[in-house]
Amino acid sequence: MRAKLREEAAEYFKAESDEHALEELADMLEVIRALAQTHGADSEVLENIRAEKAERRGAFKERILLLQLEEAH
């Protein structure tokens, strides 16, 4: 399933239209759900983890990525 996720991600990055990109994201979501099951979780557990992390660390709504973190001395 990990190889399938890589394959779907590669197809997403090659997508030339929003429609195609969304189809590949949907495929990735299906693979992610299957992977969650292999780790003993379902979609609900995965969503709870995602929501908790978003609460603690923020989400990507603003499309801001942390590139580097420096430790204060």
Image: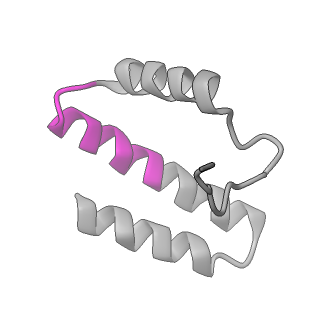
Q: Is residue 32 magenta?
A: yes
Q: Residue at x 75, y 71 (%)?
A: 17
Name the residue at the right extreme.
62
Q: In x, y percent, where is residue 72?
A: 63, 49
Q: Is residue 65 above or below residue 13?
A: above
Magenta span: chief secondary structure? helix
Q: In x, y percent, where is residue 60?
A: 71, 43
Q: Is residue 18 left or right of residue 67?
A: right
Q: Is residue 49 above or below residue 27?
A: above
Q: Residue at x 47, y 24 (%)?
A: 47
Q: In x, y percent, where is residue 50?
A: 50, 29
Q: Where are the magenta residues, as a range? A: 28-41
Q: Is residue 39 left or right of residue 31?
A: left
Residue 25: image quadrant is bottom right
Q: Residue at x 54, y 61 (%)?
A: 24
Which colour scheme appears in the figure?
one colour
Q: Is residue 26 above or below residue 17?
A: above
Q: Is residue 45 left or right of residue 36?
A: right
Residue 59: image quadrant is top right
Q: Is residue 68 above or below residue 33?
A: below
Q: Tag count in the figure?
A: 0
Q: In x, y percent, where is residue 12?
A: 57, 69
Q: Is residue 30 magenta?
A: yes
11 or 40: nearer the viewer: 40
Residue 36: image quadrant is top left
Q: Quadrant of the N terminus?
A: bottom left
Q: Residue at x 34, y 50 (%)?
A: 31
